[in-house]
Image (tube, helix red, strand yellow):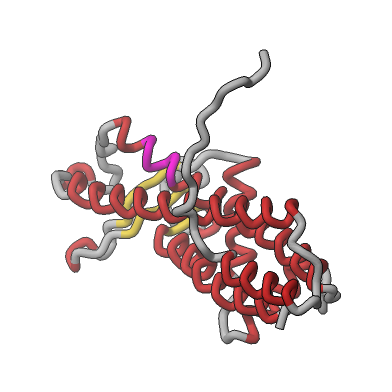
Amino acid sequence: MSVTKWLHVDYIAADPWVLPIWTAANRAVERGRVGALPDELGQLGLHVSTRLSMIQTLIRRINTCARRLEELIATRQPHHEFTAPDNGYAFSLPPDFKYAFLVDLDALLFEVNSCCELMGRLFERVYEHAGKALPLTPVGRTIRQVLEAAGQDAEWFAKLDGHRNFFIHEGAPYFAVDLSRADTGHYDLLIMKRNLRSFEDGRQFVRYSELRQIVGGFQNSKVPVQEHLARLFS
């Protein structure tokens, strides 16, 4: 059945990260240094902007869920708490809340990973459009070099790849709550890669604080990468 009538949705509020790059490119067009931006490159920029906005939405939802989780676990009783020598009783959470939280945690890793791949493709295409050769290949090595030159730690790349590859190909996330410092009001979410009976092996779970570091590394990388690509047209 052919589409004869439709409704477009306004996405003008999408993340503007790519706009300074396009501004620099258009100025280079006016100076006759490069050709007009091809539609394919413009579409790729829109894909990146949309994913960046999706990530921000997920972060807001996860932060809301994390605050709600603290409120819910405040009602726990001593018999709910597990220790190395003693098993407790599993703490019940509303199913809709629990699985929505898992969906968002899983989706955040997926979306950040996907956005990194799209930004890598954009990086290559902008270099090509600017008539420049990538200093290092594959493209990830050049991006790491850009981040390191800006004084940033790029190790979050490898952590993101490892965790996302596990959850997309090998298993599903579960979570428990670390109460080790609960007396100071500090909790940490433990995103498990299997149903664990102890947390001695750090390879079997991801701390929420580590996930925040990965996402923070990604967020911090946006400005150096943006500025680097815009300078290609100067």
Q: Is residue 231 visible?
A: yes
Q: How many marks?
A: 0
Q: Residue at x 50, y 45 (%)?
A: 107
- Residue 163 location, quadrant: bottom right
Q: Nearer the viewer, residue 144 or 5?
A: 5
Q: Residue furthest top?
A: 1
Q: Is residue 140 above or below residue 11?
A: below
Position of 93 with respect to 123 (left or right) is: left
Position of 95 with respect to 171 (left or right) is: left
Residue 17 picture location, percent across and down: 54, 65
Position of 36 with respect to 27 (left or right) is: right
Q: Is residue 138 visible?
A: no
Q: Nearer the viewer, residue 177 or 200?
A: 177
Residue 102 highlighted magenta (yes or no): yes
- Residue 181 location, quadrant: bottom left
Residue 232 picture location, percent across and down: 73, 79
Q: Is residue 200 above or below residue 77?
A: below
Decide whether the magenta segment is chiefly helix, strand or loop: helix
Residue 82 highlighted magenta (yes or no): no
Q: Residue at x 62, y 51 (%)?
A: 47
Q: Nearer the viewer, residue 135 or 73?
A: 135
Residue 77 picture location, percent across and down: 14, 44
Image quarter hosting the N terminus: top right
Q: Residue at x 65, y 41 (%)?
A: 169
Image quarter hosting the C terminus: bottom right
Residue 170 picture location, percent across and down: 63, 41
Q: Residue at x 74, y 72 (%)?
A: 29
Q: Nearer the viewer, residue 103 or 77?
A: 103
Please state the extent of the stretch shown in magenta in the rendering.
Answer: 99-104
